[in-house]
Amino acid sequence: ILYEPIIHFPKYGVINFHAAPLPECRGLHPVIYCATKNQGKFGVTAHEITDRKIDAGEILAQTPIFQSQEKEVFQLEEMVNLSGVSLY
């Protein structure tokens, strides 16, 4: 979680790439949360950070990821992170 001076320092703002669909899956360990609590719906969200609220800024873009077969959590993490690179 960033401190206010850091959030407001960059001229063009701060963007976070969150490894899950927001607002449904906020917080830590988003891939594990999606696998267990979000019916296996994965995704990546780019959102603006304007204050210290966690994963709560304006959503700028989202990429849904449809997982059709069982995978281990490390494979899921890789799949989501690679999608984040593409979204970037």
Image: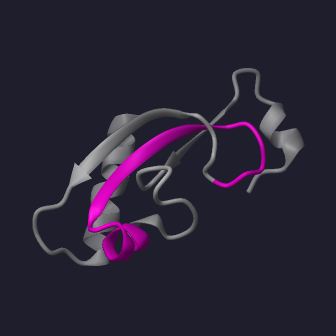
Q: Is residue 61 above or below residue 43?
A: above
At horizontal 18% and vertical 60% (from top left) the residue drawn is 67
At horizontal 25% and vertical 69% (from top left) the residue drawn is 75
Magenta segment: does it hold 34? yes
**What is the quadrant of the C terminus in the image?**
top left
Q: Position of residue 3 (x, y in %)?
A: 84, 50
Q: Position of residue 46 (x, y in %)?
A: 49, 39
Q: Is residue 62 left or right of residue 26?
A: left
Q: Is residue 68 left or right of residue 42?
A: left
Q: Position of residue 5 (x, y in %)?
A: 89, 40
- The colour mode here is one colour
Quarter of the rendering containing residue 54: bottom right
Single out the residue that lies furthest toward the top. 11
Quarter of the rendering containing residue 47: top right
At horizontal 31% and vertical 57% (from top left) the residue drawn is 42
Q: Is residue 48 left or right of residue 24?
A: right
Q: Is residue 28 left or right of residue 61?
A: right
Q: Is residue 33 above or below residue 84?
A: below
Q: Is residue 11 above or below residue 51?
A: above
Q: Nearer the viewer, residue 78 or 40?
A: 40
**What is the quadrant of the N terminus in the image?**
bottom right
Instruction: State which region is magenta.
Output: 32-54
Magenta segment: does it hold 85? no
